[in-house]
Amino acid sequence: MPYIGNPITSGENNSFKVLDDITSYTLTFNGSSASIVSVANNTITYNSHRFITGQRVTYNTTGTTITGLTAATVYFIIKEDQNTIKLATTYANAINNTAIDLTGLGTGTTHTINVAFDGVNTKFKATYDNGTKAQITRAAQLTLSVNGVIQQPQDTTSPTNGFGIDLDGVIIFSTAPANTDIFWGNLVANNFPTFDISDNTVDSFTGTGSLTAFTLSKEPANSQNLLVTIDGVVQYPSDNTNVRAYSVVLNVLTFEGAPGNGTDIQVRHIGFAGATSSNVTGFYGRTGNVGLTTADNVNVGIITATSINVSGITTLGITSATSLVVSGISTLGITTATNLTSQSIVVSGISTLGITSTTNLTSQSLVVSGISTLGITSATNLTSQSLVVSGISTLGITSAINLTSQSLSVSGIITFTNGPILVGTATSTGTASQPLQVTGGAYVSGSVGIGTINPSAKLDVEDNSASGYIAEFRQKHTSNSAQILIDSPTNGESRPVSMDMSRAGVLQWSIGQAYLDTNQSFHIATSTLQSGNTGSKLSITQSGNVGIGTITPQYKLHVVGSFAATTKSFVITHPTKQNYKLQHGSLEGPELGVYIRGRTTENIIELPEYWTELVDKNSITVNLTPIGDNRVWIEEINNNKVYIDSNSDIDCFYTVFAERKDVEKLIVEIEEN
């Protein structure tokens, strides 16, 4: 009995098919047609071609070749889509989508591209009835024979024996078949669609003007099992002989041309659907048992509630507030808080509280605790205990006037009214912010503490401020100025201890630590280290690494740039003689060279991969020393490989030299300054 919507059939007719011969497949096309060969896009178009990216093919023609190609030449396929290909010069270029530039059409209607068993290709498209693609998802759906031997099916894209399969009906042999191999194959069964209550669903998309591929919510049997519309206009699917609006591979719907920006795309999976409940049929774009989610933004009118409790919110902004209890919020901003009654605002556990205006506050109307920063622009007409602040690290009040008893309490500050305490003079030249002014010399027999009441040395200077210098020692004479600065911490970084040396008011050298240098290195610089380490010429890290030309040396001596020496040598502990050192000199030559050496029994010496960017390939030379009485010689040096040959089995030592190209060439003879 058929499913609803399917015709009655006597049996399934799409299984047990003989596969097309894949030992050799030739595509013949008109190379002079601009509708087939696109010079602008470097493509060749043929509906439902059988090619796969990376396949090695041979191009030929009886006419004039397409400009950019050569007749009877091997190329590699780049599959653009089911109907379009490009050609590449190498397998690597094909995989990286680097296509040959086609600059002109050919002549003649017989241009061919052939893919065959050649000992290189392992992937071939499974088709039957002269090009119909097999619908397979398991290797066991195929029976394949090579040279009369049935091949083992493996459900993998990397078979270790026999064959595997890939998407879109691709056969993958574990070993590339040769052109002399004899092949036959059967398709045991295609994949067939089934219908259940999940069918008849609709996928909706919006066109962008550039996107052509869209992922469906489920995998249809084929493109005929979809009803696709764009802005209500039904689209027709492509088939084996005609390119139309769209095609489907697995659950990916691909349009031949990108739908316009903002167009409404609907894809209906054809079948039947049965209701599973009698719940609502539409709510915020959802059906079935539905409810609000965190993705819903609900706009309503007025909400009336007995109380609103707010907690665990990062930022809360209130324009006008009365009778508000707030906790667990990192930032609270209130524009106006007026006519507040007893305990009307209770704030705790908030890192930052900003109130623009607080007026007409009554007893205990603002209680603040456990807050790191409190800023009040204006606090006026305050009565007894009207502002109670505790446990706050920073309190800023721009204006505080008409304060009554205990409305503002300050302690720990020396208070004076009319200028500083004067020592050694009767004339004040200071201000009230300078409580002690000394004119002339001073003698202190004990220890002097600045910033501390318990000095631990003859002069003990302490500072706990977030910025500013702890100490400055300056020679301000314009012809020979110098300074030593000790800075204080800021932003959690150690500020520098450094000494600047100047001549005629111009900085010459700065020695010490640098501003915001997290490595805590010692520097010698030509710009002040108070501004950072950008002018550092020499750096010494705490681990003992020394850098010249770098502020992050990775070695005991790390030089960025060139250096010169009369001789180059190293000294190490003698490996066999006690109480001796071993000293070796370095080989010198008129170039900045590198080399590798070793022993090989192969006919190819693989040069290091990094040599492609490190050395000049034209400077490569090779020394070969045969082991035994055989002869060895160099065939060629190409593609970062040295090819060698011998009159017998290869066994030799080798040394390969080359000159670096990543640096300037060495100037051998230089004139003395």
Image: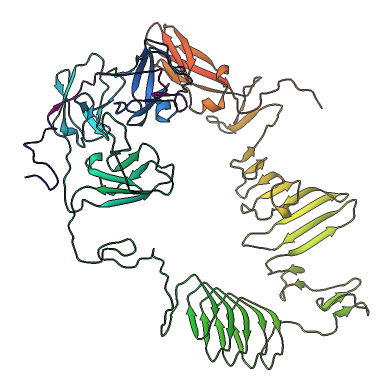
* Main secondary structure of the magenta stretch: loop
- Residue at the location (39% across, 63% down)? 295
Quarter-wise, where is residue 382 in the image? bottom right
Picture quadrant of residue 331: bottom right
In magenta segment, residue 552: no
The residue most toward the front is: 233
User: How are the colours assigned in the image?
Assistant: rainbow
> Residue 233 versus residue 499: which sits nearer the camera?
233
Give residue 347's position: percent from left, percent from top. 52, 81
Q: Is residue 9 above or below residue 595?
A: below
Residue 23 lies in the magenta-colored region: yes
**Residue 559 in the image, given as x and y percentages of width and height:** 65, 37
Which quadrant: the N terminus? top left
- State the image quarter where residue 127 is shown: top left
Residue 11 lies left or right of residue 21; in this view the side is left
What's the residue at 68%, 87% (across, down)?
Answer: 380
Residue at image coords 67%, 34%? 561
- Say whether residue 78 is left or right of residue 325: left
Position of residue 25 measured from the top left corner of the image (x, y, whole percent) = 27, 19
Q: Quadrant of the C terminus?
A: top right
- Above/below status of 532 relative to 378: above
